Image (cartoon, grey):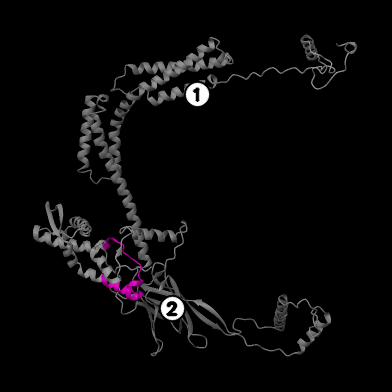
Amino acid sequence: MLACAFDDVGGRDFDLLLANHFAAEFKTKYKVDALTNKRAFTRLMAECEKLKKLMSANSVALPVNIECFMEDKDVTGKLARADLEEMAAPLLQRVDACMKRLQAAVNFAPEDIFSVEVVGGSTRIPAIKKLALANFGKEASTTLNADEAVARGCALQCAILSPKFMVRDFNITDCQPFAITMHWNKATPDEDNAVEVYPLFHQVPQSKVLTFYKKEAFTLETIYTDGQTIPHPSKVLGRFVVNGVQPQASGENSKVKVKVRVNIHGVFNVSSASMVEKIAPGDDEPMETEDSSTAAETSESSEAAAAPAAESESNPEADKPATEDKPDAASPDSKAKEGEEKSAAPEEKKPRKPKVKTIDLDVVGQTSSLEKSRINTLTEKELQLIANDRLEGERQHAKNAVEEYVYEIRDKLHGDYEQYITEAAKDEFSAILSSTEDWLYDEGEDEKKQVYIDRLTDMKKRGDPVAVRCKEDKTRAESFDQFWKAIIHIQKFIGKFREGDELYNHLTEEEVSKVEKSLAEKQDWYNKQHTACINLKKTDDPPVLTSQIVTEKNALEKAVKSTMTKPKPKVEPPKEEAKPAGDDSQANTNTSNSNDSGDSTANGPTSNGAGDKGTEPTPEAADMEVD
């Protein structure tokens, strides 16, 4: 999937085109210049945006009507879609050129294109859809929300980059929309001093390392490659000075590596630079002694001995005994012999590889971006503006609270609160509200936050008592009724205990006496407060609040609850006594029952009724004859 953005062309350009057209028309027709009044021009831009959207669905001339536009004048105008397309011809040519550049860059035939999707508010314009059809041979699809597509794409990209969100993996490959070339100062007249670092449509983000051979500091100039149309008056991206470059000890050029990068945001920068310095042998190394060389040879021989061992692991014949031409490494004689041969052999000097070290260089960038100090200053100013906005919001909130209270309490003084305030107090309070309202729209327009808070506090000192009287009058009777019901319920409990009700015969006299005491205290408080509220005038402050009545009721119920809900102790049934082992009462009973019924006992001795154990027949039973 390929995508392109119209170069410096958007819906705002069409809105501005319409606004300038109607501003010139209104100046001629109504003698008002919208370009000199920011508020009027802002309203005109909003109306032109609406007109542009309507033109996308209508080809007939559509009107623009704005009331009280300037100098209390109403203005009106009219424009058709064809007139807009004629005025916007330069803009449409830029859109067409962008589409042609994309088609030439990808080199796709019309049959190779599967679909064409256009997003953005300006894509509603039918002329742009016609350009897409003419360039790509496909009708432009508008399945995505034109206004939300960019915002949704940005949100998805942020979720992909954020470590806090887990989203499905997306393979997004971005490219460089303009080729970038780098120039540097020549060391010799014949030196080629330019290279295209990032060609057109090169994949980004990506870093590259450039190698230079220099003896002194040099400058890198980065520009957009010539022959491109860029949406900026200057082609220069920036100049970067690489300091600290020195020649080698031998006088030859030093090898300098410069790392350049285009990051994920499309910003080019020279991120770092380093110089490779050669170190001559022996400059910073200690002289090798005989012991160190012998150790090196021993190490090399150990590595050489380890190689065949590794090979034998994969060799099928590794388990076979060693041949004669391979001496046993474990034999002391062979070790001594090998040592003599090594000492007799002359030492061979191997050529040493030159060592190098990397030195980081200082890179000073000169770009069109602001300096860090300037950025810090602007950041501090932004934070200060944010703080000012917050303070202004709080000030406006305090001012609006005063205005809202004035309107709210004044309406209630002639409504719900009228019977809870005297006529004299109402007239005085109404006068204060009216003066506050006048003050708000005059000298109190731009006062500080605390001034509004103080005004509101003073008015509430007069209005809150009236609101309390109204609220208490509506809720006090209900709270007294609930308190009285609780008293009656406790009195019934005490009466049943005194009557000896079985439900409460497990309670003690001491426990019930505590309940009676708590009830007497709260009932006395109830009678006193209830009597004080019976003859209370609605314009008087109540002697007790509903919240206090509820609190006292709850305290009484809590004090007696443990006694009134105390469960009766459980009574366990009596345990059955164990029967003696020789008890034959049951057997005698069974025998007598059998004789009475005339049953025969010829089958054997009778059971003694003790279970599965039989008894020996008595002598009387043995002498008895049975017919």
Residue under label 2: 243
Assign a secondary structure to mark 2: strand
Separation of marks 1 and 2 at Cα, in angstroms: 86 Å
Q: Residue at x 59, y 83 (%)?
A: 283
In the figure, 313 relative to 527: above or below?
Answer: below
Q: Nearer the viewer, residue 222 or 621?
A: 621
Q: Quadrant of residue 486?
A: top left
Query: Can residue 64 be found in the magenta stretch?
Result: no
Examine the residues drawn in magenta and state their main secondary structure.
helix
- Dot 2 crowding, Cα within 10 Å, few <14, some 14–19, many 20+: some
Q: Quadrant of residue 427?
A: top left
What amino acid is at disc 2?
Asn
Assign a secondary structure to mark 1: helix
Residue 231 visible in the snapshot: no
Image spot of residue 603 (x, y percent): 83, 18
- Dot 1 crowding, Cα within 10 Å, few <14, some 14–19, many 20+: few
Q: Quadrant of residue 552?
A: top left
In the figure, 324 relative to 367: above or below?
Answer: below
Residue under label 1: 558
Q: Residue at x 53, y 9 (%)?
A: 499
Image spot of residue 240 (x, y percent): 39, 76
Residue 208 visible in the snapshot: yes
Q: Nearer the viewer, residue 9 or 93?
A: 93
Report the number of numbered marks: 2
Q: Are marks 1 and 2 in contact (CB under 8 Å)?
A: no
Q: Which of the two marks, 1 or 2, is nearer to us in this view? A: 1
Left or right relative to 240: residue 507: right
Image spot of residue 267 (x, y percent): 38, 70
For marks 1 and 2, the one nearer the N-term is: 2
What amino acid is at disc 1?
Lys
User: Start and end of the magenta stretch?
Assistant: 95-123
Left or right relative to 465: residue 26: left
